[in-house]
Amino acid sequence: MPCGIYGDHLRVELVREHCATIEKAMTQIAELGAADTPNWNQLVRWIQTKDEHAQKIQDQLQSYWLAQRVKEPKAGDDEAMGTYVRQLMLQHRMMVAAMKCKQTTDVANVGALRKALDQFAEAYFSADDLKKIKHIQEHG
């Protein structure tokens, strides 16, 4: 992704959309799988959708956040290093939760992914940016 073209706020919202799609897919998979005569074609489509959106989250974490946006601070800045380590930890937590979303239909994994995303946003964005993000979420 070329530098300066994509916005960090939008990347967070895209992950939220992927989470909503994954959760919907998990619900549909459970409903279709519980049917007396499951519609196997629909079931396969929802499984593919769930897995594709989880993979998109993992791809974005790697190619956008880890490769371009989360940067190691200069030596000696202990506060910045603490923030950096927290951001990396939360990125890893999201990566693992997305992987678990591919492996299961447990919506708790989507909840863990959303929680880690919210925590990452708090660790990455300024207080003013967080207010803007919340306003966008509430008012579109």
Image (cartoon, rainbow, N blue to C red):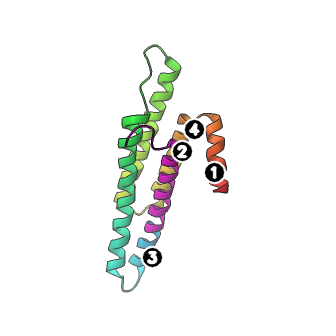
Point out the tag, 1 or 3, that comes first from the N-terminus: 3
Point out the tag, 2 or 3, that comes first from the N-terminus: 2
User: Could you tell me which quadrant the C terminus lies in?
Assistant: bottom right
What amino acid is at disc 2? His
Point out the tag, 2 or 4, that comes first from the N-terminus: 2
- Which label number is shown at residue 9? 2
Q: Residue at point 60% right, 34% down? A: 126
What amino acid is at disc 3? Glu
- Which label number is shown at residue 136? 1
Between 132 and 76, the one lying in front of the other is 132
Mark 1 or mark 3, whichever is nearer to me = 1
**Circle 4 sits in a helix, a strand or a loop, which is it?**
helix
Q: Are marks 1 and 3 in contact (CB under 8 Å)?
A: no
**Circle 1 sits in a helix, a strand or a loop, which is it?**
helix
Mark 3 or mark 4, whichever is nearer to me = 4
Point out the tag, 4 or 1, that comes first from the N-terminus: 4
- Which label number is shown at residue 122? 4
- Which label number is shown at residue 26? none
> Disc 1 to disc 2, how far (Cα)?
10 Å
Between 19 and 140, the one lying in front of the other is 140
Q: Residue at point 36% right, 86% down? A: 37
Residue at the top extreme? 76
What amino acid is at disc 4? Glu
What amino acid is at disc 1? Ile
Is 105 a magenta residue?
A: no
Which residue, given by chain and number where applicable, does mark 3 sit on? 31
Write down the region rendered in magenta. 1-25
Q: Position of residue 18 (x, y in %)?
A: 46, 57
Q: Would residue 104 be seen by someone viewing this image from the given angle?
A: no
Q: Would residue 6 be seen by someone viewing this image from the given angle?
A: yes
Kindly indicate the quadrant of the structure image that contains residue 65: top left
